[in-house]
Amino acid sequence: DTEVTQTPKHLVMGMTNKKSLKCEQHMGHRAMYWYKQKAKKPPELMFVYSYEKLSINESVPSRFSPECPNSSLLNLHLHALQPEDSALYLCASSQGGFAPQHFGDGTRLSIL
Amino acid sequence: RKEVEQDPGPFNVPEGATVAFNCTYSNSASQSFFWYRQDCRKEPKLLMSVYSSGNEDGRFTAQLNRASQYISLLIRDSKLSDSATYLCVVCYNTDKLIFGTGTRLQVFP
Protein backbone atom coordinates (compact mmCIF):
# COMPACT_ATOMS: atom_id res chain seq x y z
CA ASP A 1 0.00 0.00 0.00
CA THR A 2 1.25 3.44 -0.95
CA GLU A 3 1.65 6.05 1.79
CA VAL A 4 1.04 8.82 -0.71
CA THR A 5 -2.57 8.83 -1.86
CA GLN A 6 -3.85 10.51 -4.98
CA THR A 7 -7.37 11.22 -6.17
CA PRO A 8 -8.97 10.70 -8.54
CA LYS A 9 -7.38 7.60 -10.06
CA HIS A 10 -8.75 8.43 -13.51
CA LEU A 11 -9.99 11.70 -14.97
CA VAL A 12 -11.44 12.51 -18.36
CA MET A 13 -12.02 16.16 -19.12
CA GLY A 14 -12.69 18.48 -22.01
CA MET A 15 -10.36 21.27 -22.99
CA THR A 16 -12.61 23.92 -21.43
CA ASN A 17 -13.09 22.18 -18.08
CA LYS A 18 -11.53 23.04 -14.73
CA LYS A 19 -10.58 20.18 -12.46
CA SER A 20 -8.16 19.49 -9.60
CA LEU A 21 -5.88 16.61 -8.72
CA LYS A 22 -5.29 15.92 -5.03
CA CYS A 23 -2.43 14.34 -3.14
CA GLU A 24 -1.99 13.55 0.55
CA GLN A 25 0.91 12.17 2.56
CA HIS A 26 1.15 11.30 6.24
CA MET A 27 4.84 10.53 6.49
CA GLY A 28 5.78 13.92 7.90
CA HIS A 29 7.76 14.70 4.77
CA ARG A 30 8.65 18.35 4.19
CA ALA A 31 8.83 18.18 0.39
CA MET A 32 6.13 17.31 -2.13
CA TYR A 33 6.33 17.03 -5.89
CA TRP A 34 4.25 16.83 -9.05
CA TYR A 35 5.46 14.81 -12.02
CA LYS A 36 4.03 14.12 -15.47
CA GLN A 37 4.73 10.78 -17.15
CA LYS A 38 3.97 9.85 -20.75
CA ALA A 39 3.91 6.24 -21.92
CA LYS A 40 7.33 4.55 -22.06
CA LYS A 41 9.07 7.68 -20.77
CA PRO A 42 10.50 8.46 -17.33
CA PRO A 43 8.65 10.88 -15.03
CA GLU A 44 9.23 14.59 -15.72
CA LEU A 45 9.36 16.95 -12.77
CA MET A 46 6.79 19.77 -12.84
CA PHE A 47 6.75 21.41 -9.40
CA VAL A 48 8.41 21.10 -6.00
CA TYR A 49 7.06 22.39 -2.71
CA SER A 50 9.41 22.61 0.23
CA TYR A 51 8.00 23.55 3.65
CA GLU A 52 4.73 24.43 1.89
CA LYS A 53 6.40 26.95 -0.42
CA LEU A 54 6.89 26.54 -4.15
CA SER A 55 10.62 26.06 -4.65
CA ILE A 56 10.86 24.68 -8.19
CA ASN A 57 8.68 25.28 -11.26
CA GLU A 58 10.12 23.52 -14.29
CA SER A 59 8.70 26.08 -16.75
CA VAL A 60 5.29 24.45 -16.63
CA PRO A 61 2.51 26.17 -18.64
CA SER A 62 0.17 28.30 -16.55
CA ARG A 63 -2.77 26.03 -17.33
CA PHE A 64 -1.30 23.89 -14.52
CA SER A 65 -1.52 25.62 -11.14
CA PRO A 66 -0.15 23.95 -8.01
CA GLU A 67 -1.30 24.63 -4.47
CA CYS A 68 -0.06 23.40 -1.10
CA PRO A 69 -2.74 24.07 1.56
CA ASN A 70 -0.67 22.44 4.33
CA SER A 71 2.28 20.16 4.88
CA SER A 72 0.27 17.02 4.09
CA LEU A 73 -1.71 18.16 1.06
CA LEU A 74 -0.81 19.08 -2.49
CA ASN A 75 -3.22 20.03 -5.25
CA LEU A 76 -2.80 20.54 -8.97
CA HIS A 77 -5.46 22.75 -10.56
CA LEU A 78 -6.10 22.17 -14.25
CA HIS A 79 -7.68 24.60 -16.68
CA ALA A 80 -7.91 24.74 -20.48
CA LEU A 81 -5.69 21.72 -20.98
CA GLN A 82 -4.61 20.45 -24.38
CA PRO A 83 -4.80 16.88 -25.73
CA GLU A 84 -1.03 16.56 -25.36
CA ASP A 85 -1.46 17.02 -21.60
CA SER A 86 -2.98 13.53 -21.42
CA ALA A 87 -0.61 11.54 -19.20
CA LEU A 88 -0.11 9.92 -15.81
CA TYR A 89 0.29 12.60 -13.13
CA LEU A 90 2.31 11.46 -10.16
CA CYS A 91 2.64 13.04 -6.75
CA ALA A 92 5.62 12.25 -4.55
CA SER A 93 6.93 13.22 -1.13
CA SER A 94 10.28 13.03 0.60
CA GLN A 95 12.31 14.30 3.53
CA GLY A 96 13.83 16.66 0.99
CA GLY A 97 17.37 17.38 -0.08
CA PHE A 98 18.93 14.29 -1.65
CA ALA A 99 16.53 11.80 0.00
CA PRO A 100 14.55 9.30 -2.06
CA GLN A 101 11.05 10.24 -3.11
CA HIS A 102 7.95 8.12 -2.53
CA PHE A 103 5.29 8.17 -5.22
CA GLY A 104 1.54 7.95 -5.12
CA ASP A 105 -0.18 5.65 -7.60
CA GLY A 106 -1.04 8.53 -9.89
CA THR A 107 -3.97 10.06 -11.72
CA ARG A 108 -4.42 8.96 -15.30
CA LEU A 109 -5.65 12.04 -17.14
CA SER A 110 -7.26 12.07 -20.58
CA ILE A 111 -8.08 15.31 -22.38
CA LEU A 112 -10.75 15.09 -25.03
CA ARG B 1 24.84 13.20 -23.78
CA LYS B 2 21.96 12.19 -21.49
CA GLU B 3 22.42 12.89 -17.79
CA VAL B 4 21.57 9.29 -16.88
CA GLU B 5 21.95 6.55 -19.47
CA GLN B 6 20.58 3.04 -19.36
CA ASP B 7 20.25 0.22 -21.87
CA PRO B 8 16.49 0.17 -22.59
CA GLY B 9 16.47 -3.60 -23.13
CA PRO B 10 14.30 -5.57 -23.08
CA PHE B 11 16.21 -8.18 -21.16
CA ASN B 12 14.40 -11.51 -21.56
CA VAL B 13 15.63 -14.05 -19.01
CA PRO B 14 14.35 -17.40 -17.70
CA GLU B 15 13.25 -17.87 -14.12
CA GLY B 16 16.20 -18.50 -11.85
CA ALA B 17 18.66 -16.54 -13.99
CA THR B 18 20.96 -13.80 -12.76
CA VAL B 19 20.65 -10.52 -14.61
CA ALA B 20 22.63 -7.29 -14.31
CA PHE B 21 21.69 -3.75 -15.30
CA ASN B 22 24.10 -0.90 -15.72
CA CYS B 23 23.69 2.82 -15.68
CA THR B 24 26.07 5.75 -16.21
CA TYR B 25 25.62 9.34 -15.10
CA SER B 26 27.28 12.48 -16.36
CA ASN B 27 27.38 14.82 -13.36
CA SER B 28 30.26 14.09 -11.02
CA ALA B 29 28.62 16.23 -8.33
CA SER B 30 25.81 13.70 -7.94
CA GLN B 31 25.05 13.08 -4.28
CA SER B 32 22.57 10.23 -4.10
CA PHE B 33 21.64 7.28 -6.23
CA PHE B 34 18.65 4.98 -6.40
CA TRP B 35 17.04 2.14 -8.27
CA TYR B 36 13.29 2.33 -8.73
CA ARG B 37 11.03 -0.33 -10.14
CA GLN B 38 7.99 0.53 -12.25
CA ASP B 39 5.34 -1.94 -13.33
CA CYS B 40 3.26 -1.26 -16.41
CA ARG B 41 0.79 1.60 -15.78
CA LYS B 42 1.84 1.85 -12.12
CA GLU B 43 3.89 4.33 -10.12
CA PRO B 44 7.68 4.06 -9.63
CA LYS B 45 8.54 2.30 -6.37
CA LEU B 46 11.84 2.70 -4.58
CA LEU B 47 13.76 -0.56 -4.84
CA MET B 48 16.93 0.51 -3.06
CA SER B 49 19.35 3.31 -2.47
CA VAL B 50 22.87 2.76 -3.80
CA TYR B 51 26.04 3.35 -1.79
CA SER B 52 29.72 3.29 -2.68
CA SER B 53 30.26 0.38 -0.32
CA GLY B 54 27.65 -1.61 -2.19
CA ASN B 55 24.44 -2.81 -0.64
CA GLU B 56 22.34 -5.91 -0.78
CA ASP B 57 18.66 -6.56 -0.15
CA GLY B 58 17.76 -10.20 -0.53
CA ARG B 59 18.26 -11.17 -4.17
CA PHE B 60 19.15 -7.61 -5.18
CA THR B 61 22.64 -6.10 -5.04
CA ALA B 62 23.45 -2.52 -6.01
CA GLN B 63 26.87 -1.02 -6.56
CA LEU B 64 28.17 2.49 -7.14
CA ASN B 65 31.48 3.37 -8.73
CA ARG B 66 31.98 7.12 -8.32
CA ALA B 67 35.27 7.20 -10.23
CA SER B 68 33.64 5.69 -13.31
CA GLN B 69 30.24 7.33 -12.67
CA TYR B 70 28.63 3.96 -12.99
CA ILE B 71 25.79 2.25 -11.09
CA SER B 72 24.76 -1.38 -11.30
CA LEU B 73 21.91 -3.60 -10.15
CA LEU B 74 22.23 -7.37 -9.93
CA ILE B 75 19.18 -9.59 -9.56
CA ARG B 76 19.82 -13.19 -8.59
CA ASP B 77 17.38 -16.11 -8.94
CA SER B 78 14.95 -14.07 -11.07
CA LYS B 79 11.23 -14.51 -10.40
CA LEU B 80 8.34 -13.93 -12.78
CA SER B 81 7.29 -11.09 -10.47
CA ASP B 82 10.57 -9.28 -11.16
CA SER B 83 9.29 -8.41 -14.64
CA ALA B 84 9.14 -4.62 -14.71
CA THR B 85 11.03 -1.53 -15.84
CA TYR B 86 14.01 -0.63 -13.65
CA LEU B 87 14.80 3.08 -13.42
CA CYS B 88 18.25 4.34 -12.50
CA VAL B 89 17.91 7.63 -10.63
CA VAL B 90 20.54 10.20 -9.64
CA CYS B 91 20.28 13.37 -7.55
CA TYR B 92 22.77 16.25 -7.78
CA ASN B 93 20.48 19.19 -7.05
CA THR B 94 18.34 19.43 -3.94
CA ASP B 95 14.94 17.91 -4.51
CA LYS B 96 15.59 17.08 -8.17
CA LEU B 97 15.76 13.44 -9.20
CA ILE B 98 17.19 12.71 -12.64
CA PHE B 99 15.69 9.56 -14.14
CA GLY B 100 17.20 7.29 -16.70
CA THR B 101 14.87 6.05 -19.42
CA GLY B 102 14.61 2.67 -17.72
CA THR B 103 15.58 -0.91 -18.52
CA ARG B 104 12.79 -3.35 -19.21
CA LEU B 105 13.09 -6.85 -17.74
CA GLN B 106 10.89 -9.75 -18.79
CA VAL B 107 11.30 -13.01 -16.85
CA PHE B 108 9.78 -16.03 -18.57
CA PRO B 109 8.89 -19.48 -17.14
Image: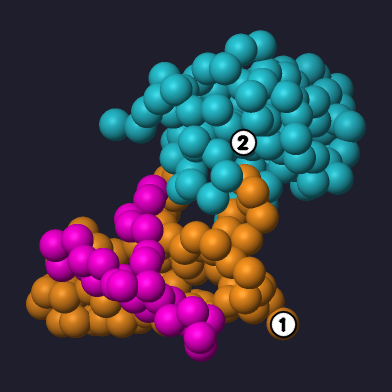
Chain colours: A cyan, B orange
Tag of residue B30: none
In the image, residue A111 above or below residue B35 = above
Q: Which quarter of the rendered picture does the N terminus of chain B lie within?
A: bottom right
Chain assignment, label 1: B
Instruction: State whether residue A41 appears in this view.
Output: no
For the residues labelled 1 and 2, the Cα–Cα distance comes to 26 Å
Q: Disc 1 marks which residue?
A: B1
Q: Nearer the viewer, residue B55 or B72?
A: B55
Residue behind mark 2:
A33
The amino acid at mark 1 is Arg
Q: How many marks?
A: 2
Q: Main secondary structure of the magenta part?
A: strand
Q: Nearer the viewer, residue A56 or B32?
A: B32
Give SS at disc 1. loop
Residue at image point 64% right, 24% down: A51
Q: Are marks 1 and 2 on the same chain?
A: no
Q: Is residue A80 left or right of residue A1?
A: right
Residue type (three-letter) at the residue carrying disc 2: Tyr
Chain ID of residue with mark 2: A
Q: Position of residue B105 (x, y in %)?
A: 34, 72
Q: Which residues are magenta?
A: B45-72
Quick check: is A74 in the magenta stretch? no
Horizontal and vertical percent for residue A70? Answer: 61, 12
Local secondary structure at mark 2: strand
Q: Identify the residue shown where x is 58% and y is 32%.
A: A31
Q: Is residue B55 in view? A: yes
- Residue A100 rendering spot, x and y as whole percentages: 46, 48
Compared to B11, does A70 lie above or below? above
Determine crowd level at label 2: few under 14, some 14-19, many 20+ residues with C-alpha closer than 10 A: many
The residue lying at 68 percent from left, 36 percent from top is A48
